[in-house]
C-alpha cells in the first residue's frame, strides 16, 4: 500500500483524527517531538539486547511483527502531525536532506564500510 498512499493523504487523515478530538492544544512542536522520541524508544525496546537471528525471528512471527509495526506507526503519527501542523512538506525536506547525505557520505568513502553506514 505504500506505493498507493501519498504523504499528504496521511497528513490529512492525522489532521482529521486530531481535529475530531480537539487535540490542537496538545500538539505544539515540543510535545510532538517528545512523542516522536517516546514512540521511537518504545520501538527500540523490541530489539534491545537481541541478536540478529532473534530479530529476524520476530519479523517472521505475525504477533511480534504486528507489535513492531504498531510502534512504527506510532512513530509516524506524531511525525506526520508535526509536519501537518507546521506546514512542512516531508517529501521535499527528505529529498533536500538526502542530497546533503549524498555529499557527506560519498560512495567512494562509504561503500563496503559498515562503520560509515551506521553513522547515517
Image: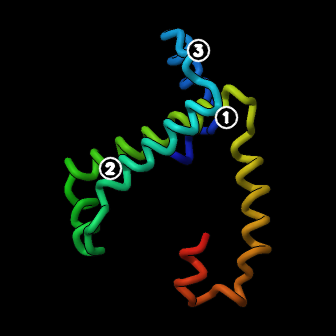
Query: In this rendering, would 73 be left or right of 86?
Result: left
Separation (CA) of disc 2 from disc 3:
29 Å
Q: Residue at x 27, y 67 (%)?
A: 49
Q: Position of residue 29 (x, y in %)?
A: 64, 32
Q: Quadrant of residue 26?
A: top right
Separation (CA) of disc 1 from disc 3:
16 Å
The image shows residue 28, relative to residue 65, as above or below, that is above
Secondary structure state at the residue bearing disc 2: helix
Residue bearing the label numbered 2: 68
Disc on the earlier residue, 2 or 1: 2
Secondary structure state at the residue bearing disc 3: helix
The image shows residue 50, relative to residue 43, as above or below, that is below
Q: Position of residue 6 (x, y in %)?
A: 62, 38
Q: Residue at x 22, y 51 (%)?
A: 64
Q: Residue at x 28, y 46 (%)?
A: 66
Q: Residues within 10 Å of mark 2 (few under 14, many from 20)?
A: many
Secondary structure state at the residue bearing disc 1: helix
Q: Quadrant of residue 115?
A: bottom right
- Foreground disc of the pair 2, 3: 3
How many discs mark residues in the rendered view?
A: 3
Q: Residue at x 75, y 58 (%)?
A: 97
Query: In this rendering, would 4 be left or right of 84?
Result: left
Disc on the earlier residue, 2 or 3: 3
Residue bearing the label numbered 1: 83
**Residue 1 appears anywhere in the view:** no
Residue 108 or 62: which is nearer the viewer?
Answer: 108
Disc on the earlier residue, 1 or 3: 3
Amino acid at each position: 500500500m505504500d506505493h498507493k498512499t501519498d504523504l499528504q493523504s496521511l497528513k490529512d487523515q492525522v489532521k482529521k483524527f486530531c481535529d475530531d478530538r480537539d487535540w490542537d492544544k496538545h500538539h505544539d512542536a515540543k510535545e510532538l517531538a517528545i512523542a516522536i522520541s517516546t514512540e521511537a524508544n518504545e520501538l527500540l525496546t523490541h530489539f534491545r539486547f537481541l541478536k540478529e537471528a532473534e530479530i529476524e525471528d520476530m519479523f517472521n512471527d505475525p504477533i511480534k511483527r504486528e507489535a513492531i509495526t504498531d510502534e512504527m506507526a506510532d512513530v509516524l503519527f506524531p511525525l506526520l502531525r508535526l509536519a501537518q501542523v507546521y506546514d512542512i512538506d516531508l517529501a521535499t525536506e527528505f529529498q533536500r536532506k538526502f542530497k546533503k547525505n549524498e555529499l557527506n557520505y560519498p560512495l567512494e568513502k562509504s561503500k563496503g564500510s559498515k562503520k560509515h553506514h551506521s553513522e547515517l
